[in-house]
Image (tube, grey):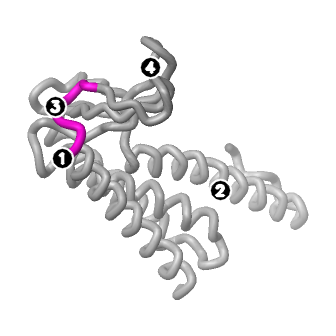
């Protein structure tokens, strides 16, 4: 158990701290919003933006989105907490994935609770007028963590199916 905690908590807390720090720096140094600041030509820019909606700026909930998304984040975090508590200390990739997703979710949740303007985004990638969605450090953690989580859960299921097959049992329905 100690190994699991020693991986999860420092990683999750470091991500939250890095996210909050970079967002504060973005607001301080990149204001006003929507003015690009070149980092690597026009490919990587820092552009302050506020996202009151969900991922990729999707805002289907209007003025209620701030509180509904905050509530949804808490519900998702509680489900991830159950998965974390069930994870074994040997399942390092699952613990890393959960730390990244949880740390990123908490970083964006803090923004949502702190300001009605929305989550601070500032990393702006693209070429010329063709831009990806503006995002932040928490979004990077959630994205990488979600990918690792999917792989870790897929591998866990494949290992369970292989163990069942070796024991002569039928694989669990997928």
Horizontal side, residue 3 vs residue 31: left or right: right
**Residue 88 at x, y = what percent?**
60, 76
Q: Secondary structure at mark 2?
A: helix
**Residue 151 at x, y = what percent?**
66, 50
Q: Residue at x 55, y 64 (%)?
A: 96
Numbered circle sitting on residue 152: 2
**Which residue bears the numbered disc 4?**
131
Numbered circle sitting on residue 79: none
Answer whether residue 149 is magenta in the image: no
User: What are the residue bounds of the magenta stretch?
Assistant: 29-35
Query: Principal SS element in the magenta part?
Result: loop
**Which residue bears the numbered disc 3?**
32
Residue 164 vs residue 88, the one in the foreground: 88
Q: Secondary structure at mark 4?
A: strand
Answer few, some or many: residues within 10 Å of disc 4's Cα (few below 14, many 20 plus, some between 14 and 19): few
Q: Earlier in the sequence, mark 2 or mark 3?
A: 3
């Amino acid at each position: 158990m100690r190994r699991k905690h020693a991986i999860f908590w420092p990683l999750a807390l470091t991500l939250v701290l890095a996210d909050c720090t970079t967002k504060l720096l973005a607001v301080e140094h990149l204001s006003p919003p929507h003015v690009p600041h070149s980092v690597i030509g026009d490919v990587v820019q820092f552009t302050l933006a506020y996202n009151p909606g969900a991922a990729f700026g999707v805002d289907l909930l209007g003025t209620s989105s701030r509180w509904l998304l905050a509530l949804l984040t808490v519900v998702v975090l509680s489900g991830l907490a159950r998965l974390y508590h069930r994870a074994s200390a040997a399942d390092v990739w699952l613990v890393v994935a959960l730390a990244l997703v949880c740390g990123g979710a908490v970083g964006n949740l803090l923004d949502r609770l702190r300001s009605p303007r929305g989550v601070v985004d500032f990393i702006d990638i693209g070429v010329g007028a063709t831009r990806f969605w503006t995002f932040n450090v928490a979004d990077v953690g959630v994205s990488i963590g979600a990918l690792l989580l999917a792989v870790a859960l897929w591998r866990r299921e494949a290992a369970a199916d292989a163990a069942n097959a070796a024991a002569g049992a039928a694989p669990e329905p997928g």
